[in-house]
Image (cartoon, rainbow, N blue to C red):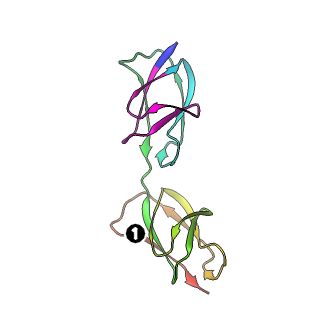
Amino acid sequence: MDEFVKVTFPGRRQVYVDRKPCGFTNDVIQVQTGTHTFDLGAPPNYGPSSQTVKVTGTLAPLPKIIEFQPLIGEVVKVTFPGRRQVYVNRKPCGFTNDVIQVQTGTHTFDLGAPPNYRPSSQTVNVTGTRAPLPKIIEFQPI
């Protein structure tokens, strides 16, 4: 039997139902009766990361509402005298002395190889508050 859901998010995003694209946010989507996992795919800048929901007894004019919210991060500036790749949680995310957008949560910053800087890494808690100026994370040459 067909059921109806409306996945909400401030902005238009692809909606994935059980890892398959099935429509877009803020539109009514038809799914089969049962338990389904909903997410918005990449980039994962929303929360929760997925929702598993039992969908039953809905009508097109009264769909089941499934809400996602954007994760609000901060802008950071990783400083170093010279241009180096910046790694956040071991993934390349930009370059030194540029402003980088980082999602909320605890992240480890480093500059990769060669390890000719100190500290070797910095773990920073990104709180999700937006400051008028970027958070500064400093590295110094050895």
Tag 1 residue = 134
Range of the magenta residues? 4-30
The kind of residue on which mark 1 rests is Pro
Q: Is residue 14 above or below residue 2?
A: below
Q: Is residue 101 above or below residue 79?
A: above
Q: Which secondary structure class fits the magenta region best?
A: strand
Q: Residue at x 48, y 56 (%)?
A: 103
The image quarter in which residue 50 lies: top right
Of all residues, the one furthest to the right in this rendering is 114
Foreground: 54 or 42?
42
Q: How many numbered marks appear?
A: 1
The answer to if 11 sits in the magenta stretch is: yes
Give the quarter of the figure containing the C terminus.
bottom right
Q: Is residue 47 left or right of residue 92?
A: left
Q: Residue at x 45, y 59 (%)?
A: 127
Q: Name the spot of residue 89 as percent of width and height, x first.
A: 60, 62
Q: Residue at x 39, y 29 (%)?
A: 27
Q: Name the spot of residue 119 as percent of width and height, x first.
A: 60, 78
